[in-house]
Structure formats: structure tokens, C-alpha cells
């Protein structure tokens, strides 16, 4: 599957989400990023 096709499918999926759901997804993503960064820092500290 090429990039444009994937993008199109993603946009179709996103249309089904409400604004609140999208915000939740973004916040979850940010939290996961922060957790990943913390884990990386802890591994480096060891």
C-alpha cells in the first residue's frame, strides 16, 4: 500500500471521530511520548 492510499484510509477513519475523540487520541499520544522519553532517560542513567 502506497503513502497516498494510506493517507486516504486514515482520513476516512478520522471522519468517523468526533472532535473530543480526536483530542483524546492526541493527548494519549503525547502521554505515550512522554512515558517513552522518561523510560529512555532512565535506561541511559543506569
Image: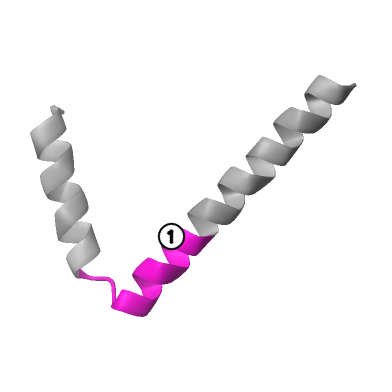
Residue position marked by numbered label 1 in the rendering: 26
Question: Residue 6 magenta-drawn?
Answer: no
Instruction: Tell me which residue sits at (43%, 62%) in the image.
Output: 25
Q: Position of residue 45 (x, y in %)?
A: 86, 24
Instruction: Tell me which residue sits at (59%, 55%) in the image.
Output: 31
Instruction: Tell me which residue sits at (73%, 39%) in the image.
Output: 38
Q: Position of residue 40 (x, y in %)?
A: 71, 29
Q: How many marks?
A: 1
2 and 26: which one is in front?
A: 26
Q: On screen, 13 above or below 5?
A: below
Image quarter hosting the N terminus: top left
Q: Is residue 19 left or right of residue 28?
A: left
Q: Secondary structure at mark 1?
A: helix
Q: Position of residue 10 (x, y in %)?
A: 21, 50
Q: On screen, 28 above or below 17?
A: above
Instruction: Tell me which residue sits at (38%, 73%) in the image.
Output: 21
Label 1 Cα neighbours within 10 Å, binned few <14 / some 14-19 / many ≥20: few
Colour logic: one colour
Q: Position of residue 29 (x, y in %)?
A: 50, 53
Q: On screen, 16 above or below 4?
A: below
Q: Is residue 12 left or right of residue 34?
A: left
36 and 2: which one is in front?
A: 36
Q: Residue 23: which quarter of the image?
A: bottom left
**Over which residues does the magenta segment extend?**
16-27
Q: Is residue 22 left or right of residue 6?
A: right
Question: Residue 26 magenta-drawn?
Answer: yes
Examine the residues drawn in magenta and state their main secondary structure: helix
Image quarter hosting the C terminus: top right
Amino acid at each position: 500500500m502506497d503513502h497516498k492510499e494510506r493517507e486516504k484510509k486514515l482520513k476516512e477513519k478520522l471522519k468517523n471521530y468526533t472532535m473530543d475523540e480526536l483530542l483524546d487520541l492526541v493527548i494519549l499520544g503525547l502521554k505515550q511520548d512522554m512515558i517513552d522519553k522518561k523510560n529512555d532517560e532512565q535506561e541511559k542513567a543506569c
